[in-house]
Amino acid sequence: MITRREAVDFCLTLDGAYEDYPFDDTNWTVMRHKGNNKVFAWIFERMEHIWVNVKGRPEWNDFRRQMFDSVVPAYHLNKRHWNSIILDGTVPEEHIRDMISESYELTRCIKSSDSKFGKR
């Protein structure tokens, strides 16, 4: 996965995801949940590559930054909770999909009756 379209298309496979362009700057694509409108992926071009900002668990964010040179603290977002994935071909697609999917799960609202643990 190295293009904006590939990133957007994968995000659209997630249930209830939609593509949005909320800024005057069309460089920024945001992927949102239909149910709550929360953003789970910020997709933009920077330094001649497509970048995808994704939310992650803080304990995993540092690990992923150490594992891949192209996973860095998020551009323009909280560095503890968000990472940027630089789509330069060095991060395996499986890991990119996993990070986007995790961000999707972390940002969707679950009614307490829907959670197997009762509350979230």
Image (tube, rainbow, N blue to C red):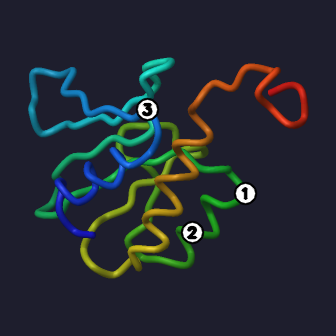
Residue at mark 2: 64
Q: Amino acid at mark 1?
A: Glu
Q: CA distance from mark 1 to mark 2?
A: 9 Å
Disc 1 crowd, CA 10 A, few/some/many (<14, 14-19, 20+): few
Q: Secondary structure at mark 3?
A: loop
In the displayed structure image, the side of residue 92 where residue 106 appears, left or right: right
Q: CA distance from mark 3 to mark 1?
A: 27 Å
Frontmost of labels 3 and 2 is 3
Q: Position of residue 36 (x, y in %)?
A: 50, 18
Q: Secondary structure at mark 2?
A: helix
- Asked if 22 appears above or below 9 in the picture, the reply is above
At a point 36% along the width and 38% down the height, the residue shown is 76
At a point 21% along the width and 21% down the height, the residue shown is 22
- Asked if 92 appears above or below 84 in the picture, the reply is below
Q: Amino acid at mark 2?
A: Arg
In the displayed structure image, the side of residue 95 where residue 53 appears, left or right: left
Q: Secondary structure at mark 1?
A: helix
Where, quadrant-wise, is the C terminus in this rendering? top right
Q: CA distance from mark 3 to mark 2?
A: 27 Å
What label does residue 59 carry, if any? 1
At a point 10% along the width and 29% down the height, the residue shown is 25
